Amino acid sequence: MPVTASRAVLRQSQFLTRRSALRHASSTSEAASKASQNASSAATKASEGLSKVSASAGPAISNAAGALRKVGGPAGKVVAFVDALIPPTLYYSKVGIELGKLVFRGQNMSPPTLATFQSYFQPLINASRNPAALKSLNFPSPQGVLSRVRNASTKEIALAGVTAAEVIGFFTVGEMIGRLNIVGYRGKAAHH
């Protein structure tokens, strides 16, 4: 009899445990579904608010842009010039950002750490705090520079040549962009 009674008690405790677990599971799932409904309701309200704001701001912005385009004279020319520059500027900035991301990932680059920044800029900060310290800096002597150039290996000379060619190339391209012309500057013809 005592064994059957302990079995009955065990079965009853198992039944109560299962019933309690089912209650907790159902209340947890109900709470999760309520939270999900609340979140979707909030997201719907936020998107409705955003669409209302964009709907009201869109015409206002386009009206302002239209009014600026109608301005005449020199101010109108400036507005038209800036207005024409906006789409290509946005396009090329997005292209540049994506190209930068590709190069960054391809070269396995990582941004410098704060310690690296501090090690590079600490001498500049110290020099700005104490300008008299600039006199004590050890600049290389001209003889030291000449001996370094004379004793340079062919690899170092080739690297310096490639770097100089890159600098000259970028300078030339920058000049062409600045002049908006490939050949020379526009100027008055010289009469002799």
Image: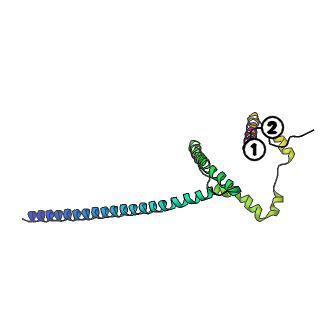
Q: Is residue 187 above or below residue 17?
A: above
Farthest right residue in view? 192
Q: Quadrant of residue 152?
A: top right
**What's the residue at 81%, 56% (across, down)?**
137
At label 2, the amino acid type is Asn
Question: Across the whole image, how many numbered discs are drawn on residues?
Answer: 2
Quarter placement of the C terminus: top right
Q: Is residue 43 left or right of residue 175?
A: left
Q: Nearer the viewer, residue 42 or 56?
A: 56
Q: Nearer the viewer, mark 1 or mark 2?
A: 1
Look at mark 2 in the image and give the residue it sits on.
Answer: 151
Which segment is the magenta one?
165-192
Secondary structure under tag 2 reads loop
Quarter placement of the N terminus: bottom left
Q: Residues within 10 Å of mark 1 (few under 14, many from 20)?
A: few
Look at mark 1 in the image and give the residue it sits on.
Answer: 179
Q: Is residue 151 above or below residue 134?
A: above
Q: Of callouts 1 and 2, which one flags the residue occurring earlier in the amino acid sequence?
A: 2
User: Distance from label 1 to label 2 (Cα)?
Assistant: 41 Å
**What's the residue at 81%, 39% (across, down)?**
149
Q: Quadrant of residue 147?
A: top right
Which mark is on residue 123?
Answer: none
**Residue 178 included in the magenta stretch of the image:** yes
What x and y, as percent, mark residue 100? 59, 46
Tell me the colour scheme of the image: rainbow
At label 1, the amino acid type is Arg
Q: Nearer the viewer, residue 122 or 14?
A: 122
